Amino acid sequence: MPQTTFDIFRYQPDFSDESYRQSFDLEHESEFTILDAMLELQNEQDGSLAVRYSCRSAICGSCAVRVNGKTVLACMTQVEAVKEEFGCETVRVDPIGNFAPIKDLVVDMDPFWEKFKSVKPYLIPDGPPPEKERIVSKEAMQKIYNESKCILCAACYSECNSFAADPEFVGPAAFAWGYRFAGDERDGQRRARAKLYSGQHGIWDCTRCMYCNERCPKGVDPRDAIEKLGGIAFNEGISWGDPGARHAKAFLISMKTGGKLNETMLVPFTNPIKSQLDVPFALKMMKKGKAPSPIPHRIKRLSEVKKLIKNVKETI
Ligand code: SF4
Ligand code: SF4
């Protein structure tokens, strides 16, 4: 049977305010998951080791932890696979990032639930209910299928750069739920939702680091949901006061007019005041051939790009 050393974050506030690390050696079945290992340690070596879990089937979203620095669901991550991936015999286990630990691997999820609630994660249809049920086509549901898979595990928040920098940032899973309803044809609040999500700490504060897409265990792709909400905000004519929105708009205009990105126009469009201060620097860069010309270029098959933009717009 394989033998593994687990280097585990410990925090026992009943005894000390200081966190510490503790190593445990464990002989275990080769199919053991990280959760199996934590429960075995809890049962056989230290009953005070705290870990949150429920279904053991990657459905309840309770057991997210960081393993060797990457956020995963403990119940769907095998110990031997981690050792192989990292080429190590010691596996490091920490609570998820960006939330305060309550005890060992268990964190305070209250801020997460607050964010989730803030996006109004429920259908708000217009008008009185129909006599019978509301029928929705398979194609219409397909549009929000990805977002419907979210199990609220908060792995995305653990990896989110914007959330780390700004604890008020609404965040990836909440926005995935936002699109789940803004994109639902039975919902009557598309414009109001776009407005709500485009406010302070909203969709335009995302740094597009893509870590949420990378680490989501269910393939929800929350960054893509944020992108789609941005598209709705565009279509509804919302958010022009926000530099993030203007930055995205600059990309769109650049693609529509030239078929490729005109980097030189990004700064003036995104932040007109700051760009005036940067003019001497920009001119110096151009002189040295380090900045592309601000004159818009046009690719040969611009009509193809325009068609693509139209298609994307129609899928939102
Ligand atoms: S979007 Fe993915 S990572 Fe984030 S809470 Fe939902 S399932 Fe978990
Ligand atoms: S892409 Fe945006 S929401 Fe996703 S982890 Fe990065 S900053 Fe957070």
Image (tube, grey):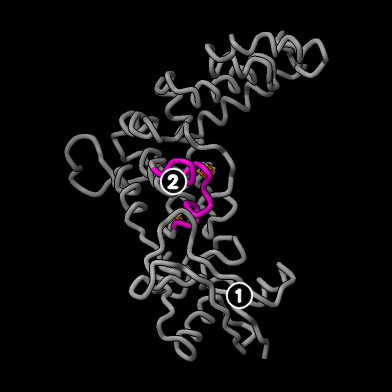
Q: Identify the main secondary structure in magenta.
A: helix
Is label 2 within 8 A of ligand 1 (CB to nearest ligand atom)?
yes
Q: Nearer the viewer, residue 187 or 281?
A: 281
- For label 2, the crowd category at 10 Å Cα-Cα, with few meaning under 14, some 14 to 19 and many 20 or more, is many
Q: Quadrant of residue 290?
A: top right
Q: In what quadrant of the picture does the N terminus appear?
A: bottom right
Q: The residue tagged with tag 1: helix, strand or loop? A: loop
Q: Residue 78 location, x and y as percent?
A: 61, 75
Question: Is 289 on the left-hand or right-hand side of 161?
Answer: right
Identify the residue shown where x is 32% and y is 56%: 110
Amino acid on which disc 1 is placed: Gln
Q: Is residue 210 magenta?
A: no
- Residue 166: tell me if it is visible: yes
Image-based side of 134 in relation to 43, left or right: left
Residue occupying the point 44% across, 19% down: 240
Relative to 80, say whether 172 is above or below: above
Q: Magenta region: which residues?
A: 154-167
Residue plotted at (55% across, 23% down): 247
Q: Which mark is residue 176?
A: 2
Badge 1 crowding class, 10 Å Cα cut-off, few under 14, some 14 to 19, many 20 or more, is: some
The one nearer the camera, 171 or 279, is 279
Q: Earlier in the sequence, mark 1 or mark 2?
A: 1
In the picture, measured across the screen, residue 95 lies left or right of residue 119, that is: right
**What x and y, as percent, mark residue 120?**
29, 43
Label placed on residue 78: 1
